[in-house]
């Protein structure tokens, strides 16, 4: 049984639960049975903490003395910001004293998996007024100055460890609500985190059902695409009317594959054009920021012009409709080849360039989720390119081809109202994504997920061939809707779009510039990472308002197809499942990132996507 390390009355540093912040605390008692110390923070808050969550003050002083700062002002005062190397890595050429060394070893032994400390920053506790004033609309509790030191320790520890730590804290009831608010506001947060070094971390917590789940998904996703396309071709696409399997040789045509390659490389060329601004992405874990050229909208305009020229010279765009399945097979083969290339090259990538979620060490899992975060050939970013270009613009071209095919097959002088609605709504969605291309840089796909089979297949096959299902369906299953119905569906789409766009812009602008005067009316909870969590505006309505808008739009895209079959509703059903799962993933990541601040946010904003429902 481990002996007690800290005595009653002793002043030590205690970690704030769920965060990476250490505060000065006084030990008030010790529970021999639970092995928990009761500690009192300076503001009177009492918590029960494990021994591994407590550190002697001298261990911080010791680290502080290793500061690499050469600034005299930094060295002269404990209030200065100081950077230190990882405790696991003593500074070269310096000797520790015997006691320091012993204590260091002790700490190391007692703190499970904490050898991966990446960064230790002493942060001045001066509050950032700009950032705290708006917190919860309770400025009186947030503008107080607290000049005590906070030690911010950012650890690159495995996900499970973070979860374990969160679970093992035992919080005592707070003395009063005001104090609680003060604690959450951190009074003095908005610290700048500077990375000194990156220690590689393995993905411990596997998503998507782990190895088995990802293997199944790799089989299931292509099978679903082909099933949907075969069903759509049937006269009666009822669920129980299983389509006959086509002969294998009919699925492949070299010319179709050639057209697909031409399309892919044309889009790649357009993305490399030196037009459009160059912006920086969010900081990577090593502090670096990658540069991205924002010219998706120009690429779209140029593609539209090229298609216009082809149509002018009577190029039969419904070639796409006639060979739709072969195009889907070509895209699937290409995405598989691309995934293999991505995985092979990721084996040579430096550890710090691997995706936080795709570094499990299991081939199948990493192959599926993507091993390397931002694979690039020179300045050409493969993931960023695939996210918005060949698949998304391809989706619009496919829709147009379906519209022309409908007119040709049914001998119409005008496309049907349903087809016009589907084409217009989805065109708006794609144009919006390209117009707001920069916003993709703050999404999970770019910041968290690696580039592997999941995104390659998703971007190049799933998006263009499944998202165009309604238009494909309408070619074979004409549906008549009245003008009032069309107007009602249009209103629904506009509502969805408005929520989707304003929520995404609000968060994107806030992330890029929290001090933006246009956002001055919004309130947020500060977090230990330096980023805030909006609690008013759209992000105070539900926790993922952008998903809500997206789902409303998805419904509006399916409604023009009538109610004869469930097939055109596949998109909205699948999309709800996708976004519910994605939301859960994001919540999990946010809880790890923001700890109690995230829990606080969840209390303030209880619904995830659908107000009063979910
Ligand atoms: P989001 O744009 O929803 O971003 C989630 C991130 O936002 C979180 O990880 C967190 O990141 C930040 N955040 C969460 N809560 C707050 C808050 N209260 N205040 C400030 N920041 C907060 O992620 P997605 O990439 O999932 O979605 C982007 C868009 O793409 C959505 O509109 C979605 O509907 C759409 N989408 C469309 C798909 C399709 O197939 N059509 C598929 C997937 C998504 P941090 O704090 O680190 O900044």
Image: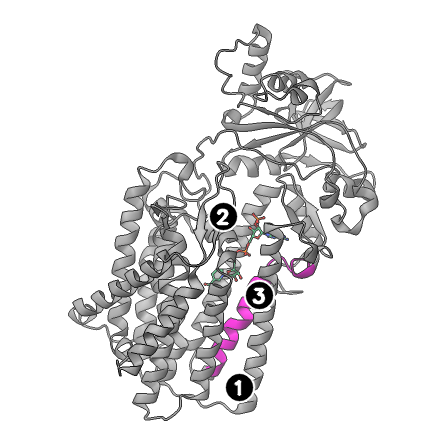
Q: Nearer the viewer, mark 3 or mark 2?
A: 2
Q: Bounds of the magenta span?
A: 537-560
Task: Give the quadrant of the N terminus.
Answer: top right
Depth check, front residue: 216 or 331: 331
User: Is the C-beta separation of discs 3 and 2 under 8 Å?
Assistant: no
Q: Nearer the viewer, mark 3 or mark 1?
A: 3
In-image side of 203 versus 189 (left or right): left
Q: Which residue is mark 1?
A: 486
Residue at image location 75% in from the left, 49% down from the top: 134
Name the disc covering residue 280, or none. Answer: 2
Label 3: which secondary element = helix
Label 2 and label 1: CA atoms lie apart by 42 Å
Residue at 49% x, 11% y: name it.
Answer: 93
Relative to residue 381, is residue 262 depicted above or below? below
Give x and y (percent) for residue 210: 40, 47
Q: State the residue at coordinates (64%, 60%).
A: 542
**Disc 1 on helix, strand or loop?**
helix
- Which percent across, then down, holds residue 87? 54, 20
Seen as rendered, the residue at the extreme front is: 274
* Disc 2 within 8 angstroms of ligand 1 (CB): no
Q: Quadrant of residue 541?
A: bottom right
Callout 2 crowding tier (Cα within 10 Å): few <14, some 14–19, many ≥20: few
The local secondary structure at tag 2 comes to strand
Using the image, tell me which numbered label, if any, was put on residue 501.
3
């Amino acid at each position: 049984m481990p002996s007690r390390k800290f005595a009653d009355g002793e002043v030590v540093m205690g970690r704030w639960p769920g965060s990476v912040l250490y505060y000065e605390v006084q030990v008030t008692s010790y529970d021999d049975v639970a092995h928990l110390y009761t500690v009192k923070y300076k503001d009177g808050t009492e918590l029960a903490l494990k021994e591994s969550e407590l550190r002697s003050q001298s261990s911080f002083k010791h680290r502080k003395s290793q500061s690499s700062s050469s600034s005299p002002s930094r060295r002269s005062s404990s209030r200065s910001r100081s950077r230190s190397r990882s405790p696991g890595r003593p500074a070269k050429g310096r000797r520790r004293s015997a006691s320091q060394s012993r204590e260091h070893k002790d700490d190391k032994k007692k703190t499970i998996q904490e050898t991966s400390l990446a960064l230790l920053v002493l942060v001045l506790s001066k509050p950032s007024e700009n950032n705290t004033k708006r917190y919860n609309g309770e400025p009186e509790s947030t503008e107080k100055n607290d000049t005590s030191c906070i030690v911010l320790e950012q650890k690159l520890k495995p996900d499970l460890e973070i979860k374990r730590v969160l679970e093992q804290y035992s919080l005592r009831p707070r003395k009063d609500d005001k104090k609680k608010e003060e604690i959450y506001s951190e009074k003095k947060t908005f610290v700048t985190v500077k990375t000194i070094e990156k220690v590689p971390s393995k993905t411990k917590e596997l998503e998507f059902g782990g190895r088995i789940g990802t293997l199944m998904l790799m089989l299931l996703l292509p099978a679903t695409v082909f099933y949907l396309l075969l069903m759509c071709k049937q006269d009666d696409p009822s669920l129980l009317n299983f389509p006959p399997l086509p002969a294998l040789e009919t699925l492949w045509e070299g010319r179709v594959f050639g057209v697909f390659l031409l399309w892919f490389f044309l889009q790649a060329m357009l993305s490399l054009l030196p037009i459009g601004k160059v912006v920086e992405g969010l900081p990577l874990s090593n502090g670096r920021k990658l540069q991205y050229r924002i010219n998706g909208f120009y690429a779209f305009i140029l593609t539209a012009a090229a298609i216009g020229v082809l149509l002018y010279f009577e190029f039969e765009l419904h070639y796409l409709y006639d060979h739709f399945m072969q195009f889907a097979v070509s895209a699937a083969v290409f995405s598989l080849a691309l995934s293999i290339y991505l995985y092979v090259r990721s084996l040579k990538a430096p550890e710090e360039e691997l995706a936080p979620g795709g570094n499990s060490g299991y081939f199948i899992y990493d192959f599926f989720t993507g091993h390397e975060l931002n694979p690039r050939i020179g300045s050409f970013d493969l993931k960023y390119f695939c996210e918005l270009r060949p698949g998304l613009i391809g989706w619009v071209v496919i829709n147009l081809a379906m519209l022309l095919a409908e007119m040709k097959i049914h001998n119409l002088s005008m496309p049907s109202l349903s087809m016009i609605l589907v084409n217009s709504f989805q065109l708006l969605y794609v144009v919006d994504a390209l117009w707001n291309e920069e916003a993709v840089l703050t999404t999970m796909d770019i910041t968290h997920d690696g580039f592997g089979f999941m995104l390659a297949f998703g971007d190049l096959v799933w998006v263009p061939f499944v998202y165009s299902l309604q238009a494909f369906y309408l070619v074979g299953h004409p549906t008549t809707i009245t003008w009032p119905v069309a107007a009602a569906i249009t209103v629904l789409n506009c509502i969805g779009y408005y929520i989707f766009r304003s929520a995404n812009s609000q968060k994107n602008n806030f992330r890029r510039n929290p001090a933006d005067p246009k956002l001055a009316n919004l309130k947020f909870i500060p977090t230990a990472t330096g980023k805030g969590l909006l609690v008013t505006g759209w992000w105070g309505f539900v926790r993922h308002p952008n998903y809500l808008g997206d789902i409303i739009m998805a419904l509006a895209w399916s409604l023009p197809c009538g109610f004869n079959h469930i097939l055109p509703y596949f998109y909205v059903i699948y999309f709800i499942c996708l976004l519910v799962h994605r939301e859960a993933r994001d919540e999990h990541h946010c809880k790890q990132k923001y700890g109690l601040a995230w829990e606080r946010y969840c209390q303030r904003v209880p619904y995830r996507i659908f107000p009063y429902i979910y």
